[in-house]
Image (cartoon, grey):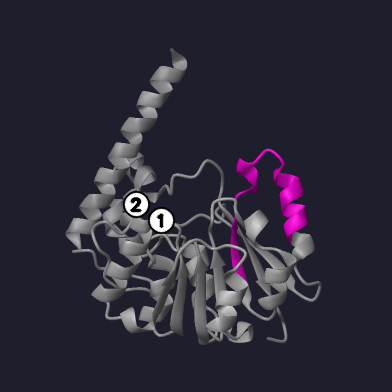
Amino acid sequence: MTNFFGAISKAIMKQRRKMLSRAIFDRYGGIVQRGPYANMKLGDRSNISQGSLGLKILGIYEKLVVEKISSLAKFDDFINFGAADGYMALGPLFNKSCNRAICFEMTEEGRAAVKRNAEMNNLGEDLVLRGEVNFNTVKLLQELKVNPVKSVVLCDIEGAEFSVLTKEVFSFLRGATIIIELHDKLMNNGDDLREKLIENIPKDAKLGILSYKQATTFDGISDLEELSDNDRALVMSEGRKYFGEWMVVEYLNS
């Protein structure tokens, strides 16, 4: 019985979060309001779950990651493994931080959203869109004449990072700034997987961690300040089971 009521409560909160996010989207017509991606347009089906759409419009979705990307010098290629709706990849293209976005997204719905959002912002000519990232990805990046030293890579592939990011992949991407969302806490042998991932990284790389524990604040964001505590918590939630963590791989001489 406890599990039943827990499931009902979770479903209600999820629906409420979607409704609040949609209200924020509608208020601003799908235009990002602040942050490095301000004024970028998003379609109304930009996020498959719809729950994080409000955060994107407010410009605070995965804020630590966006700030890290925006702190880097201008680069040639933004390579996104697991592009979802393209928000993270199209942002740097939109604000001219990079010259090209190369997106890998396994779902047809996601690829359609990336393409739609790119077209809405007149970015289609500088977008390369492919399917699932796999063991042929290095060959494809080579064919696209990617220069890793002038590239930034964002990887968010729901746990597949531990099988996809092999020594070969890291070797090819040596010199790139690589940001990897870690999903080891969702997996039974997570500690071993993280250790193996680190072993695959070249020894001259510098490793760092971005943690969602460094909380996003809502000071000065009237859309959040006007909400009740409960609704504000729902909007600011990204629906994670654990605090999000991203490993940052950098090379000092790049």
Residue ID for mark 2: 48
Q: Quadrant of residue 151?
A: bottom right
Which residue is at 49% across, 45% downward? 240
Whole-percent x, y for residue 79 in the image: 52, 74
Which residue is at 56% across, 86% downward? 145
Asked if residue 205 lies in the magenta stretch, the reply is no
Earlier in the chain: of badge 1 and badge 2, it is 2
Which residue is at 27% across, 81% downward? 122
Instruction: Note whether residue 181 is visible.
Output: yes
Asked if residue 191 lies in the magenta stretch, the reply is yes
Q: Looking at the picture, tell me which residue is in the foreground, 119 or 179.
A: 119
Residue 230 versus residue 254 in the image, above or below: above
- Give the side of residue 4 with respect to residue 253, left or right: left
Q: Residues within 10 Å of mark 1 (few under 14, many from 20)?
A: some
Residue 107, labelled with which disc? 1
Question: Which segment did they paint magenta?
Answer: 178-197
Q: Tell me the quarter of the image containing the N terminus.
A: top left
Q: Compute the Cα span from label 1 to label 2.
A: 10 Å
Q: Quadrant of residue 208?
A: bottom right
